[in-house]
Amino acid sequence: MSISEMASTPLAQGDDVVPCCPPITAGELSPADAEKTAAMFKALSDPVRLRLFSRIASHPGGEACVCDIADVGVSQPTVSHHLKKLREAGLLTSERRGTWVYYQVAPSVVATLSALLDLRD
Amino acid sequence: MSISEMASTPLAQGDDVVPCCPPITAGELSPADAEKTAAMFKALSDPVRLRLFSRIASHPGGEACVCDIADVGVSQPTVSHHLKKLREAGLLTSERRGTWVYYQVAPSVVATLSALLDLRD
């Protein structure tokens, strides 16, 4: 998929989404930017959490409820704990609709990771 | 910077560089791929380590010796410890030339992070 095609994907970033930090190739990260970026990486540094994140990122429609993603081999309370950590780190957004809470990958995550690598114009 | 321009940058990935894992948008990461990717994120989840990494990534020529990057406010042994962790996680490569060891960002890191986000064709 090309950069231009990203505009139509669930992981697309809108024009109004501002990435957290400058590219790692642009110079040394400031201590404040390093703290923010390190916290994002820390939230993704657990294998089960990363699998839950990739399930949500790859789910049709770009969102998933906990009922769609809970079978990763850990208990339901552990799944809930990981989803809470991902939300607190700003990696996921969530919305309650009826019985279920639906999770989406936060657009700023893609913006930040892309900007870190200086992959966008 | 566009994707095409990356070919001439220090962080460019060669045609022979294979990223570790499929995109997070392509489906659930396998447990094995999640382990590898989580280890990479874990190595980048410390703010000082991330600042050292960005110093090397942004240094002229795409490499730096420890003499170039040591003034991040921690002791020399701590800097050495962080560089060792980054090298062990496959994020940096190193080469001794004369008195100094020079560190480079491993091409596979950019390939893997780009592939995770499905940013390349």
Image (cartoon, coloured by chain):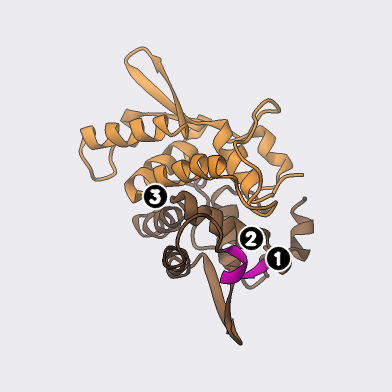
Chain colours: A orange, B brown
| The furthest residue to the top | A98
x and y percent of residue A105 in the render? 50, 33
Disc 1 marks a residue whose amino acid type is Pro
Check disc 1 and report the residue beneath it: B10
Front: mark 2 or 3:
2
Closer to the camera in the image, B65 or B43: B65
Give residue B57's mark. 2
The image shows residue A102, relative to residue B73, as above or below, that is: above
Mark 3 element type: loop
Of marks 2 and 1, which one's residue comes earlier in the chain? 1
Disc 2 marks a residue whose amino acid type is Ala
Check disc 3 and report the residue beneath it: A45
Answer whether residue B22 is visible to the viewer in this image.
Answer: no
Residue at (54% x, 56% y) in the render: B72
Q: In this rendering, do the residues under marks 2 and 3 share a single chain?
A: no
Residue at (71% x, 44% y) in the render: A3
Q: In this rendering, do the residues under marks 2 and 1 share a single chain?
A: yes
- Disc tally is 3
C-alpha span from label 2 to label 3 = 21 Å
Report the chain holding disc 1. B
Disc 3 marks a residue whose amino acid type is Ser
Structural crowding at the residue carrying mark 3, measured as other residues with C-alpha within 10 Å and reported as few (<14), some (14–19) or many (≥20): many
Decide whether the magenta segment is chiefly helix, strand or loop: helix
x and y percent of residue A25 in the render? 67, 54
State yes or no: discs 3 and 1 in contact (Cβ < 8 Å). Answer: no
Asked if the stretch drawn in magenta spans residue B71, the answer is: no
x and y percent of residue A14 in the render? 67, 28
Judge left or right: residue A108 versus residue B7. left
| The furthest residue to the bottom | B98
Residue at (71% x, 65% y) in the render: B10
Front: mark 2 or 1:
2
